[in-house]
Image: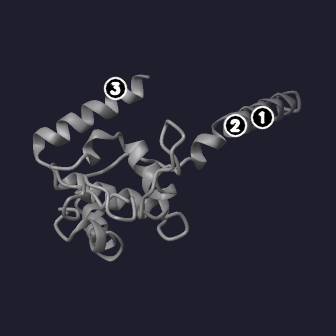
Amino acid sequence: MVRRRPLLLAGASAALGLAGVAAVALWPRALEPSTTLLPDDPQVVALGETVYAAQCAACHGANLEGQPNWRERGPDGRLPAPPHDETGHTWHHPDALLFELTKEGPPKEMGNGEPYLSNMPAYEGVLSDEEIVTVLSYIKSRWPAEVRERHDALNAQMAVQ
């Protein structure tokens, strides 16, 4: 038995070493928030509806309808809040981008260097990552099946790239 003990200790030491390497290799992934929406999870959607009512409905409408004339800039050069229902463009963006826009706010400039004027705030520090996912899941849960399918296809396409 004395001879087996060093082998057992060496095996245990090697296993712990491999576990440590695996933990370090996976560490950044474990810290990244999941941006996958869960529109079929009733608990997530219910929480998202509550957060939406408190944080989003004042601008985007209680029924996700957005503000009137949302495609036309106002006198201040800013666009009104768009709808988040199927009539808007929210579903044209993958989950990860919707999450980023909600957390960080829209970009400060357009691709051509011109400023992008928006009243949309960044919700980092206001909503947790999980709350952002619940709100977006609630929004997606309200889309018709064919729009949700198109959005799912967009997400799948982005995952391949």
Q: Residue at x 18, y 54 (%)?
A: 85
Give 133 or 67, whichever is nearer the viewer. 67
Where is residue 15 drawn, in percent x and y? 72, 33
Q: Amino acid at mark 2?
A: Ala
**Does 95 sit above or below residue 4?**
below
Where is residue 102 drawn, in percent x and y? 43, 57
**Does 71 sit above or below residue 61?**
above
Q: Which quadrant, please, contains the C terminus? A: top left
Q: Residue at x 22, y 57 (%)?
A: 83
Secondary-structure class at tag 3: helix
Q: Amino acid at mark 1?
A: Gly
Residue 129's label in the rendered image is none
Q: Amino acid at mark 3?
A: Gln
* The furthest residue to the top: 161
The residue labelled by disc 1 is 17
Instruction: Kindly indicate whether the residue at mark 1 contacts the one at mark 2 (C-beta within 8 angstroms).
Output: yes
The residue labelled by disc 3 is 157
Where is residue 130 drawn, in percent x and y? 44, 60
The residue labelled by disc 2 is 19
Q: Between label 3 and label 1, give the one nearer the viewer.
A: 3
Classify mark 3: residues with Cα within 10 Å, few (<14), some (14-19) or many (20+). few
Locate residue 90 relative to residue 122 in the image: left or right: left
Whichever of labels 3 and 1 marks the residue nearer the N terminus, that label is: 1
Give how far apart the Cα atoms at labels 3 and 1 are. Answer: 37 Å
Give 114 or 135, whichever is nearer the viewer. 114
